[in-house]
Image (cartoon, rainbow, N blue to C red):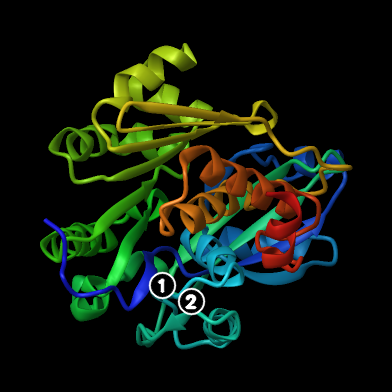
Amino acid sequence: MTNPTPPRYDVIAIGNAVVDVIAACEEELIEELQLNRGGMTLIDEARAEELYEAMPPAREVSGGSAANTLAGLAMLGLECAFIGQVADDQLGKVFRHDMRATGIDFDTPARPGEPATGRVLIFVTPDGERTMNTFLGAGQYLPASALDEDLIASGAILYLEGYLWDPEEPRGAMRRAIEVARAAGRKVAFTASESFVIERHRADFLAMIDEGVIDILFVNESELATLTGEADFEAGLAAVAGKVPVLVATRSEKGAVAIAHGERAEVAAVPVMKVVDTTGAGDQFAAGFLSGYVKGEPLTRCLKRGAICAAEVISHYGPRPEADMLRLMEERL
């Protein structure tokens, strides 16, 4: 079913409203603090305070996977809106300000009281690898009642973040959002986010794929293996490709593959002088891809856009673009 009403927004995302606290550190600190090097660990507020105390000088940047993707899309000139839960506190205000300053509509009301707004404490080692420690905070309590269903129905694409599938309330909210978007004839895009999320909710994700409620699925190589149980990349692609209209699989320095309606496209990674910080690479790849997809561009060109965005974001600290992305696209495409 297609909606006769033209969409008001290109992409509407539901995701974690978190602030990234990023610091460069030496390898020794990772061991000393017993962190899961290169991975993402969920932590409580007490551990968040403890790690923050131990961090070298840090900078705060609004993050959250889906929110980062929207920031990239907004910088590419697309109309975007965000749905996510912050607390009524200082970090909540920082997050809201950053979203709106980027040109993204964000009107989900703040949640009073505890817990605080979510944050991710990110330790970046000299090789550019990021070790993330996430306190989800208020983001875990996004209720279905906070959804603006007219807003969701007005977006060409509803983009959902796998990280937010973990807590119960947002999971219910996202299920409802999928129903609203599909009833309005809109597309649903889903990013798997991280292998540990897939391990916990694999049955759910596979059911959604089998039911045909996901139109565009974003995974990286390891997430694809976890989702399908296939260690071989090609076997993993084959297991999912026929079940989603558009499958996008990223492979870091090995580039990316997309399969849409039986057509396959591949691109190489865009070379980078120095990898500074890999935070946000997948988020920005999704932004680049979707910026072409909503315009109906060919698959290879959508992938190229993704690769350009990913290369830009790993060349500096932080998960959001810093270059003039429209100009960069003109130069590189």
User: Badge 2 local density, few (<14 within 10 Å), some, or many (20+)?
Assistant: many
Circle 2: element type: loop
Residue 166, visible in the rendered structure = no
Residue pictured at 75% horizontal, 67% vertical: 322
**In the foreground, 39 or 280:** 280
**In the foreground, 140 or 296:** 296
Residue 138, disc: 1
Going by the numbered disc 2, the residue's amino acid type is Ala
* On screen, residue 229 above or below 158: above
Image quarter of residue 59: bottom right
**In the foreground, 200 or 326:** 326
Locate the N terminus by quadrant. Answer: bottom left
User: Badge 1 local density, few (<14 within 10 Å), some, or many (20+)?
Assistant: many
Left or right for 118, reference 36: left
* On screen, residue 129 above or below 22: above
Residue 45 rendering spot, x and y as whole percentages = 53, 65
Residue pictured at 53% horizontal, 56% vertical: 287
- Tag 1 and tag 2, C-beta contact below 8 Å: yes
* On screen, residue 245 above or below 73: above
Residue pictured at 43% horizontal, 52% vertical: 293
Question: What residue would you read off at disc 2?
Answer: 116
Circle 1: element type: helix
Residue 264 rendering spot, x and y as whole percentages = 43, 26
Residue 215 rendering spot, x and y as whole percentages = 28, 45
* On screen, residue 238 above or below 112: above
Left or right for 302, reference 23: left
